[in-house]
Amino acid sequence: MPDADEIRLAATPGEAANLGGDRKRPLRSDWEQVKYDIMQKAVFNKFATNSEIREILLSTGNEETA
């Protein structure tokens, strides 16, 4: 999947967002069925690999976050 690799290897988060949001690139055919699980894993990995933001999130306790 060359598009996924191109997005993953983007120089900045903004560049990755622009590449991922480009509707000239087709979404995978099963996106509606898999998007929740994919995004859940992405958010989990974001906090699992960055202790600074993980601690900020944990400091919110049970408060609702936006």
Image: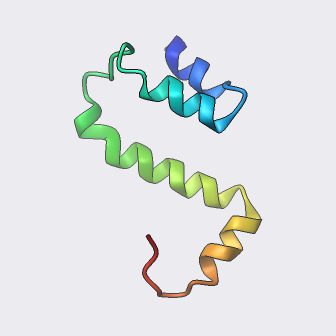
User: Which residue: 29% across, 32% down?
Assistant: 31
Look at the image and name its color scheme. Answer: rainbow
Determine whether, in the image, residue 54 is placed left or right of residue 37: right
Q: Position of residue 6 (x, y in %)?
A: 60, 18
User: Which residue: 54% across, 57% down?
Assistant: 44
**Residue at the right extreme?**
52
User: Which residue: 59% across, 20% down?
Assistant: 5
Residue 6 against residue 30 in the figure, above or below: above
Foreground residue among 39 and 63: 63
Q: Position of residue 16 (x, y in %)?
A: 58, 30
Residue 59 against residue 18 in the figure, above or below: below
Q: Quadrant for residue 32, please give it.
A: top left
Residue 27 against residue 61 in the figure, above or below: above
Quadrant occupied by the C terminus = bottom left
Foreground residue among 14 and 27: 14
**Residue at the bottom extreme?**
62
User: Which residue: 62% across, 79% down?
Assistant: 58
